[in-house]
Image (tube, rainbow, N blue to C red):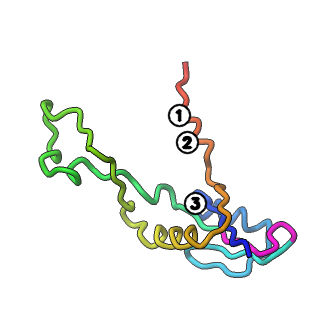
Amino acid sequence: MNRMVILAEKPSQAKAYAEAFTIQEKTKTYIQLKPDDTFPNGATITWGVGHLVELKEPHDYKPEWKRWKLDQLPIVPDRFLEKVSKGKWEQFQAVKKLLQQADVLVNAADVDREVMDSYEYV
């Protein structure tokens, strides 16, 4: 059985996707779709509430980087580390669990913005 998880950018986007199908269950972290012709085994839609994860702050690497000094620049850690964004722990844990259980993952987030931000306009 394929467990399909659809990742939306935010709750309103997930809700809009779900409206095209029959909802089996709705929780505060995901929407479960009933099996149908499109999703014979059903599907789960979850969301990111914006960025669930962010880069750690410079002072998280070294306390002396809390106050920036010209002679310390550029601040480049040996390895960049991430942390769960403030207030998003519960949704992060739910998304993580669903992704770990998924056989198929559909990225239905708003990729347009991220792709467009990476282009340099002349």
Q: Residues within 10 Å of mark 3 (few under 14, many from 20)?
A: some
Q: Using the image, tell me which numbered label, if any, was put on residue 97.
A: none
Which of 31 and 62 lies nearest the eye of the viewer? 62
Magenta part of the chain: 37-44
Tell me which amino acid carries mark 3: Lys
User: In what element is the residue under mark 3?
Assistant: loop
Tell me which amino acid carries mark 2: Glu
Tag 3 residue: 10
Q: Is residue 82 left or right of residue 96?
A: left
Q: Is residue 68 above or below residue 24?
A: above
- Figure quadrant of residue 44: bottom right
Does 21 lie within the magenta span? no
Q: Locate residue 77, reporting x and y percent.
A: 26, 44
Which of 104 and 72 lies nearest the eye of the viewer? 104
Q: Using the image, tell me which numbered label, if any, was put on residue 114.
A: 2
Tag 1 residue: 118
Give the alpha-carbon distance from disc 3 to disc 2, as whole Å: 15 Å
Tell me which amino acid carries mark 1: Ser
- Label located before the other in sequence (3 or 1): 3
**Given the current orientation, which residue lies at the most extreme right position?**
37
Give the overall secondary structure of the magenta segment: loop
Q: At 65% from the left edge and 74% from the top edge, which residue is drawn?
A: 31
**Given the current orientation, which residue lies at the most extreme bottom position?**
25
Q: At 51% from the left edge and 68% from the top edge, which residue is drawn?
A: 96
Q: Nearer the viewer, mark 3 or mark 1?
A: 1
Q: Is residue 100 left or right of residue 42?
A: left
